[in-house]
Image: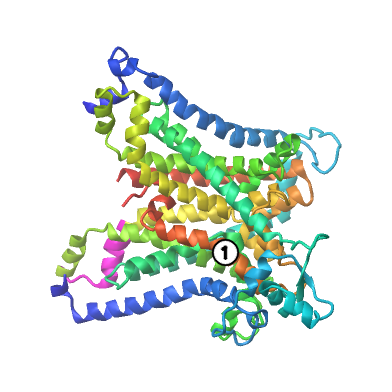
Amino acid sequence: MATLTMTTLDPQSKAARRGLSDLAIRNLFIIPTIIFLIVFNIFPLLYSLGYSFTDFRASSNAPANFVGLDNYRTLLNDPFIWSNFAITAKYVIVSVAGQVVVGFGVALLLNREIPFKGLITTLLLLPMMLSMAVVGLFWKLLYDPSFGIINYAFGLGRFEWLSNPDMALYAVALTDIWMWSPFVMLLSLAGLSAVPKHLYEAAAIDRAGPIYTFFRITLPLVAPILMIAIIFRTMEAFKTFDLAYILTSQPTTEVISIRLYKMAFQEWQTGMSCALAYIVLIMVIAITNIYVKYLNKVKER
Amino acid sequence: MAAVQTTSERALNKVAIVGVLIATIIFLAPIYWIVSTSFKPRNLATTIPPTVLFEPEISPFVKLVLRRSQLREQPSPEEYAAAPWWERLVFDGGEKVVRDGQGNVQLSGYPSRFVNSLIVAIVSTVLAVGMGTITAYGFSRFKVKGEQDWLFFILSTRMLPPVVVAIPMFLMYRAVGLNDTHLGLIILYTAFNLSFSVWLMKGFIDEIPREYEEAALVDGYTRMEAFFKVVLPEAATGIAATAVFCFITAWNEYAFALIMTRRTAQTAPPFIPSQVGSGLPDWTVIASGTFLFLLPVAIFTFLLRNHLLRGMSFGAIRK
């Protein structure tokens, strides 16, 4: 077997004796990356785990005092933090649901013989490649109540988007939907094009209606890939910072990342913010786990 | 297929074409608005109804790169006539170019931020793709104990929320003096892109038949030579695609840059929003800065179009 000879090269062979051994090359190629990631990702996390048990403030010279689990207790009993999580949850649901509806919808339309399909698909994908912060900023002009093109195009008069506390979160979500529906569309298109044509032909012979065909053939076969898109977007929406931070400063749009940023770099409650960071981290790890499981599932197909 | 196409099927196709057309217009409208605003005279940027047809001018780009101040009194006709064309454009906008003691024109903050973005994105991309490629080769070709766990560990570092990592990194950087330095940002972006580059490159290298290297080994190449002379050329497309993805991610990144840089090493994403402060912003200048910043990404997206799916799914979906 060719694979076997490659992975376990006979140490006595000529190829192995020339130059570095396979084992040395493997270690040389892999270990620096692992060390780099441990030093710059894991070590900082351990560092902040330590601070999360203290009342340290990075703005003062006072030494950090050990306070045990006090920070965690305070945070979990703080109704304002829970409202930040509630805002985040609302944002995730609105934004991801919007992306799935728009993205999957456009993918269904595109999954036909459309002239210039390749070019149109590339153009539609453009928003997700752009910088959230920089393009997000420009949406401030688009949303402007007096001279924004959104109000003009849809005849909304002087509708307040970003300065209205009840609307601001939806406005941020709308921009996010514009940016990331293309992502759902891209993955959905891959799923749709993988559905075997003969299934549709068989359904047509059986005189199955379009609705029946959609729910019995299309949706079940696209579901795994769509699920990947949903979990990935959920994870990203949960971490969202750029858009909401740039577009508004309403308390109703203070998602958890913004609260964390303010706590750490504006109020300088370093110890407390490290504790909050850990609470967020545990949630992200949970979602990541689900994501990777699905990724491997699709990969095995 | 055409033979079985019914009338209703054809009607449905027409509906789909109209739907796609509408979607394309809506999705491209904001981008069109950025581009068109960046060529508008200032007074046409915020009109009701919005100005669609206008005579394009490049004054926003001139203003973007120059430091300007409010014009207190009109320049004398001689002064105006003696000024170069770009200075006249600034005069026309009711502003004047700021000069230093020697009369040299002062630049705005934008050019240096743009250069910073280039430095940080390019260097971190080279590092992430270089390390990522060899690590991917290691995982692809050799037995590694607990391979799946290591790969999961590598991927999980990518999923960390930036603000969570930024708090301890800020403290550590402050201790060693790396805040507001190019190196500090380069390290962060390399770490961030490294996991992505390992996952993507592993997919590309897995696809290169092992027989190629085997043949090279039989021909007397060492494993290293086989890697550099056989595997790397075969993986060139994958390396290019991965590099473009890493570049775009680093180029667009906002949160780390906002927290870790103030001035010297500040990149464009935190700089451009900071220009919209108090008062009425000049949207034509912001649009021109945005347009120049988005241009490289738009070009790359077009070049990358066949690899987008693969990159966006961390190499899980190949097509």
For mark 1, what is the residue?
A: B292
Q: Is residue B216 magenta?
A: no
Figure colour scheme: rainbow
Question: Could you say which is closer to the camera, residue B53 or residue A206?
Answer: B53
Left or right position of A96 against B308: right
Where is residue B32 shown, x and y percent of the image? 51, 74
Q: Would residue B217 appear left or right of A19 to someone viewing this image? A: left
Which corner quadrant of the image does residue A243 belong to?
bottom right
Residue drawn where x is 63% and y is 69% of the image: B61
Residue B222 drawn above or below residue B155: above
Residue A127 placement, left or right of B118: left
Q: What segment is highlighted magenta in the picture?
A: A206-221
Q: In the image, is B191 to the left or to the right of B107?
A: left
Q: Kindly indicate the quadrant of the structure image that contains residue A19.
A: top left
Residue, x 79% and y 32% (percent of image)?
Answer: A66
Can residue B156 be seen in the rendering of this structure? no
Q: Is residue A2 above or below residue A192?
A: above
The residue lying toward the viewer, choosing from A94 and B73, is B73
